[in-house]
Amino acid sequence: MKRRAFLALAGAAAVSTACGTASGSGSGTKTLRYQGSAGAVTLPELAADLGYLGDVTLDWVGNTISGPQDIQSAATGQTDFGGAFNGAVVKLAAAGAPIKAVVGYYGSDDRAYNGFYVQENSPIRSAADLAGKKIGMNTLGAHSEAMLDIYLQRAGVDPKKTEPLVVPPVNTEQSLRQSQIDVAVLGGILRDKALQTGGIRKLFTDFELLGPFTAGTYVFTDRFIKQNPDTVRTFVTGVGKAIEWSRSTPTAQVVDRMTRIVAKRKRNEDGSALKFWKSWGVAEKGGRVSEHELSMWVDWLAGRGELANKKVDISSLYTNEFNGVGP
């Protein structure tokens, strides 16, 4: 997969939405189609289990390992909402997809972060050592590649000299240990599970680079929001409440709740890594979206030539109108 492959996906989504396929599931729907994550619990799934979605139900259509793919599915009407790294949201919108960010769902703090890890005996010690090296991440053109670029650029290293590769998250640790890649991007429960096993060490983390920040948001199409404002309000507020419930509830209880969710949905998956969950990493109360969380990626995208000189109106890309959890 090429370094800028997602740009083609974004263009395809823009064409598809222009043809009127990004519609959601109809006027006044109370059912939201979505993609989940194997062995993990998403915030909407937690919100539903806590009863925060009221009469709105979730319809799982499969799993995804890629934020850009997830929001493309929402933009083209294959699902009703999707979540991705905010840079990917900006890029898809710049390509013409009529989407709007409504609530944050993941980020980085001192407990929830993505790290770049190497084998314990690896000669890689700094950015300069990454030239010609293979870095495994869940998708290209999104969160992990942005962090890599920032890390390299701050050290005066050309990002083009490295080789980012797509590796499914569940396989990333193994790929590193088998020397199929030189660096592995690991986050959350998969990171902590790998660290517990030992034999790897940290090169850097996104939290060390940028401090605490909300990194990704859930989006709906403008059309879906217009047709289903009450459903969107219930969803956004429910997710916001789930974020705050997770903050105020002992971690062990949150983990226990999510473990039970995985067990009862019977998707033939391994939820054992959930015990390593610590935080969603969302910076703002209730996942409210700030303009800075989107605008900070415009320069990065422009520097990569991925905005095609298009001006992006950040204020039109997000709304907190539907979030009933106060700032």
Image (cartoon, helix red, strand yellow):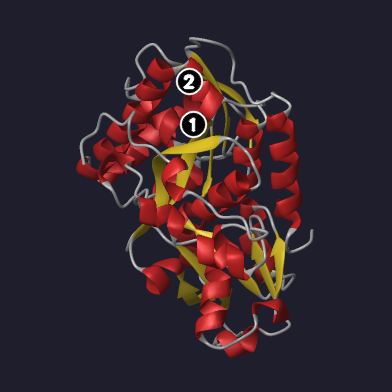
Comparing 213 with 290, the one in front is 290
Q: Which x, y percent locates residue 69?
A: 66, 42
Q: How many marks?
A: 2
Task: Note whether 258 is above or below 204 in the view shown.
Answer: above
Q: Quadrant of residue 38?
A: top right
Task: Note whether 198 is above or below 113 in the view shown.
Answer: below
Task: Note whether 243 is above or below 300 in the view shown.
Answer: above
Residue at 53% from the left image edge and 52% from the top image edge: 312
* Residue 253's disc number: none
Q: Which x, y percent locates residue 182?
A: 67, 76
Residue occupied by mark 2: 226
Q: Is residue 66 visible?
A: no
Furthest residue in direction right, as rendered: 1
The quarter in which the N terminus is drawn is bottom right
Comparing 86 with 135, the one in front is 86
Which mark sits nearer the N-terminus, 2 or 1?
2
Query: For the residue marked with disc 1, what is the amino acid?
Result: Val
Q: Which x, y percent locates residue 168?
A: 67, 53
Residue occupied by mark 1: 262
- Label 1, residues with CA under 10 Å away: few <14, some 14-19, many ≥20: many
Q: CA distance from mark 2 to mark 1?
A: 33 Å
> Mark 2 and 1 residues: CB-CB less than 8 Å, in contact?
no
Q: Which x, y percent locates residue 301?
A: 59, 63
